[in-house]
Image (spheres, rainbow, N blue to C red):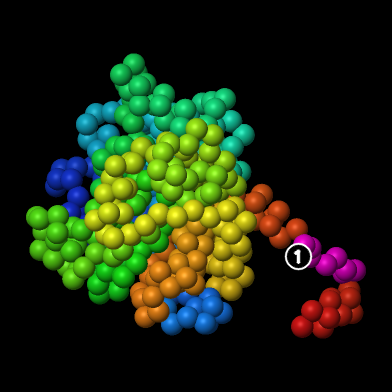
Amino acid sequence: MTKHYTGLIERYRDRLPVSASTRIISIGEGNTPLIQLQNIPRLIHKEVDIYVKYEGLNPTGSFKDRGMTMAVTKAVEEGSQAIVCASTGNTSASAAAYAVRAGITAFVLIPEGKIAQGKLAQTLMYGAKIIQIKDNFDAGMKIVKEIIDHAPVTLVNSVNPYRIDGQKTAAFEIIDELGDAPDYHCLPVGNAGNITAYWKGYREYAADSGKLPAVASKAPVMCGYQAAGAAPFISGKMVDNPETVATAIRIGHPQSWDYAWAAQKQSGGWFDCFTDDKILAAQKMLASFEGIFCEPASAASLAGALNDIGSGKIPEGSKIVCTLTGNGLKDPDIAISQCAEDKPVVVEATLDAVKRAILEQM
Ligand SMILES: *Cc1c(COP(=O)(O)O)cnc(C)c1O
């Protein structure tokens, strides 16, 4: 029987910290589509190539799976029987799934009442031990960083360096597909692990990390976007009560603070923030003009790119990649409430009534 390779560790194993004897914990993550937008550039009358990296097609529906395959693989290799994380939802879903795959236990701390329905459903189905806390993500993060000294559990938040290693493979995939790095890379920033990971991956392929042969001629300008109510990188200081409809980036105390600033400075990039309305408008635009459904937090990348293309900060002729961090199905409540005015018609179940309904709406 031929061996069937699926996940990103197999694909990029020479660039990841695994050995021939490492048992790989994979559910077939990575290798997500890089989709060129066709209608939106025309709509905004700009000569730009915008690609979206659709991370919502990972096994649990977010990019967190890239980091989790590595983090859980290493936890198991090191003999761990349990993992722990704080989460706004996607990390918990991912940790729960990979723990099942490995045959170990996942403990997840989530903010009570503040995680999207889809993420909660997944975490329940995978059978994680859910601990709801009466506070936000940042409070949970503080606790899990301490709990590892008091219980035999491995921390799998993005402060775990293996998470960053797994997630950097998204940059590899983009370069492998485009033949070189894009000019600009736009992504939402919450805890700032992902911007750290992309920057690491881009630099490794451009070989300015000093150890690998170059695959890319350059690294992109990194543009990190936040929600206005949770924007510590814009105010320059931590935010104590972050609020946004984009719950995946409802974070006021980013753990990868210094790494994210380094990515911004070294790449010549910037941070910016947008209101919830603007983020939701970008989410709807992507769905209704391109057929691509991402969760609210993910749409911050497109909201930012469109804003900066509009202002000329990102010039025409640029090649831009936006990471769509999570699947739109994660948060059905927000999606349905956004479409409250587009109520479906109700008609009698007859040929005539359905015919009329179609012809009226042509
Ligand atoms: C985790 C997450 C983010 C934020 O990523 P960070 O690495 O915390 O900056 C953005 N969008 C979605 C959908 C996420 O799950």
Q: Residue 232: where, in percent of width, then height?
A: 44, 42
Relative to 309, 268 lies left or right:
left
The number of numbered discs placed on residues in the rendered structure image is 1
The residue that disc 1 covers is 342
Instruction: Tell me the element at label 1.
Output: loop
Judged left or right of residue 125, residue 238 is left
Task: Decide: is 185 above or below 159.
Answer: below
Q: Residue at x 58, y 53 (%)?
A: 275
The residue lying at 35 percent from left, 50 percent from top is 194
Residue at image location 55% in from the left, 44% down from the top: 229
Residue 111 can be seen in this image: yes
* Placement of 127 over or under 210, stated as above or below: above
Q: Nearer the viewer, residue 137 or 106?
A: 137
Residue 340 location (% of width, % of height)? 75, 58
Q: Residue flagged by tag 1: what amino acid is it?
A: Asp
Spot occupied by residue 265 in the image (x, y as percentages of width and height): 27, 54
Answer whether residue 118 is magenta in the image: no
In the drawing, does residue 362 fall left or right of residue 92? right
Position of residue 283 measured from the top left corner of the image (x, y, whole percent): 57, 61
